[in-house]
Image: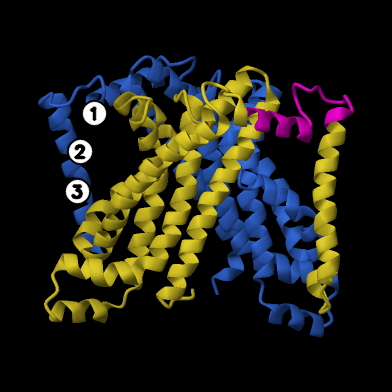
Amino acid sequence: MKARTLIGLATVLVLLLGWYVATDLGGLIDRQRFPSPSDIVAAGSQIVSRGYAGGTLLTQALYSLRLVVLGFLVAAVTGVPLGLMMGLSRRFEALVNPAFLLVRPIPPLAWIPLAIVWLGLADGAKILVIWFAAFVPAVINSHTGIRNVDQTLVAAGRVHGASAAQIVWEVLIPGAMPMIFTGLRLSLQASWTTLVAAELVGAVFGLGKVLSTAYRDIYPAMIAVGMITVAVLGALTTKILEIIERRVIRWREY
Amino acid sequence: MAGILTAARPGRGQLALLSVAGTAIFFGLWQILAISGLVSKFVLPSPTEVITAGLTMVVEPFAGNTIQGHVIASFGRWAMGFALAAGIGIPLGLAMGYWRVLDAMVSPIFEAYRYIAPLAWVPFAALWFGTGIGGPVMVIFTGAFAPCVLNAYRGAHLVERHLIEAARTLGAGSLRVMAEVLLPGALPSVVSGLRVGAGLGWQSLIGAELIVVSSGIGYVLVQGQSNLAPEIVIAAMLAVGLTGLLIDIALRFAESRIRRRWGQTA
């Protein structure tokens, strides 16, 4: 295990060194196309202190983060209950499934133009698209989660005199919780991908706006800064979701 | 809510009836909402208008091509990017499963790469490879690559160690072990990865076409949007969904055949 970490670290260092030598030192690579480490540091400090594409890194990142969190929350609040209801009642599932199956194969990104026709470039359009993107995994996994609950547990509950409501709240929903969180993690990933795409297509603010402006200015170092920021925020929000998951599903660690 | 709680399940006929009712409600509400005048035609066209727009595009070119021409253009790009992702990703994943050193070397970089949303590569893809074929192919590649690597890697770990040792004792070289022991053993997992990758690649391509490319079905979406023609946008969305669905069905079919053939059911 120790050796593994060392080898990984060494590889990363060698690559970073090779990159530095090829760009900053040797000039083997055209820096107009591929930024050097010093270019990225310069671009980073520019956007942090003076701002780029209409705001500093902090304001742009917070702007995008707010949209992702809002869209994700709306999707979670609507998608999880819908999935649970479809899991609990086969009648409800039969009623809702056709519409859901029809909409499901359409990639969330394909909703972007329609959202722009409906709501323009405002925040609402982005939240709508993120909602669509994050909705599907939330529904599917909550649905499967309920269906995968061990039926012996349900039977045991019934034998011990639990009411239908008790079985739903104390057996089925807790049993589905791990799957629900798997779905939410996928939803969160989809939210970030979709936000980046939506902001690249058209935005006034945000990290996608940074990316598209940097592309138009042929400023590769700033593109890299934008990408790194998106990746870091994606990783951070995933970690936060994992912490929440561990709090909610505490009983899993017997 | 009683469905799962009571032993008696609703009958098939009843469920089928509910499905039909659900479909009817969906299209009925849409049609009523569209023709009632509550929402403008420029916001929500009726289902019939969408179908008309779609059929018109089959014969009359829109944005430089017919709708099937656009779909074929997109599909061609997708196939190239996907083939590239599979061609590099699967051998890399298998090799990472075989050589621990390579695994240790590549894993940290790969983990970092996975956090970058595929669409965030669009600016670099366009800058490096242009917006014709190279750029979109790179975006599809970045979307499809990770699942290809991951599933080949996981599949390689499912192969029993003594099969590999037996092959090596009998004199097989590393490449032969990978091609003739690891790949067949990992195949079911590899194909699942291909299916996930295919979907992500298709979705990434649509994103790339929305942003920088000026042909393909994603471009029809953008053109419909700037012409304020939601019926064209929705018809194109259906074309996107249908193509993605067909790709998925084809790979699902391949997956089930391979699972049966190679004797794994999980």
Q: Residue under mark 1: which chain is it in?
A: A
Lower sequence index among marks 2 and 3: 3
Q: Point out which mark residue A11 bears.
A: 3
Q: Position of residue A237 (x, y in %)?
A: 51, 43
Pick the front one: B18 or A167: B18
- Identify the colour of chain B in the image: yellow
The residue under label 2 is which amino acid type? Leu
User: What chain is colored blue?
Assistant: A
The residue under label 3 is which amino acid type? Thr
State the residue lying farthest toward the bottom. A159
Q: Is residue B234 left or right of residue B128?
A: right
- Could you say whether the residue bearing mark 3 is in a helix, strand or loop? helix
The residue under label 1 is which amino acid type? Pro
- Could you say whether the residue bearing mark 2 is in a helix, strand or loop? helix
Q: Point out which mark residue A16 bears.
A: 2
The residue at 77%/79% (across/down) is A157
Badges 1 and 3, same chain: yes
The residue at 59%/65% (across/down) is A250
Q: Position of residue B11 (x, y in %)?
A: 84, 72
Q: CA distance from mark 2 to mark 1?
A: 8 Å
